[in-house]
Image (spheres, rainbow, N blue to C red):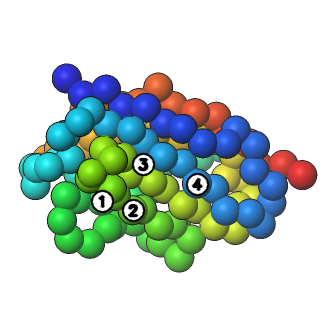
Amino acid sequence: QVQLQESGPNLVKPSQTLSLTCGVPSGSMTTTYYHWSWIRQSPGKGLEWIGSVPYRGNTYFSPSLKSRASISRDTTKNQFTLQLSSMTPEDTAVYYCARERADYALDIWGQGTQVTVSS
């Protein structure tokens, strides 16, 4: 079992950049089998996959968010970070980090963190 924990701001102003970090158990990221993903949930859009980063190689993003999203990893610190630029009120959602299996199933999730975009 893998425990994931999101951290970051709960309130972001329009046009600013959201930065969220997901902490994972020590050593969990040193494998090529799993990817590490960000997902969000809102009443208007439901569940939406944002993107993922593997142990090695390129990151992958939802086409609708590719131009605004960035995911970085720090294996030595056992964490990966989402940055989402040009935030608007429509980006208000609960943001989750999750482990993604080779069959694309998101089997382990963090608790989620509410992010509200408002001035």
N-term-proximal mark, 4 vs 1: 4
Q: Secondary structure at mark 3?
A: strand
Q: Residue at x 70, y 68 (%)?
A: 86
Within-10-Å neighbours for mark 2: few <14, some 14–19, many 20+ = some
Secondary structure type for disc 1: strand
- Report if the CB atoms under discs 2 and 1 are less than 8 Å apart: yes
Residue 97 lies, in percent from the top left, at 41, 41
Q: Nearer the viewer, residue 102 or 72?
A: 72
Q: Nearer the viewer, mark 2 or mark 3?
A: 2
Q: Which residue is mark 2?
A: 72
Q: Amino acid at mark 3?
A: Trp
Report which residue position mark 4 lands on.
Answer: 19
- Quarter of the picture containing the N terminus is top left
Say what amino acid the circle numbered 2 marks.
Ser
Q: Residue sitting at 33 percent across and 56 percent down?
A: 74
Q: Of helix, strand and loop, which one carries label 2? A: strand
The residue identified by callout 1 is 53
For marks 4 and 3, the one nearer the N-term is 4
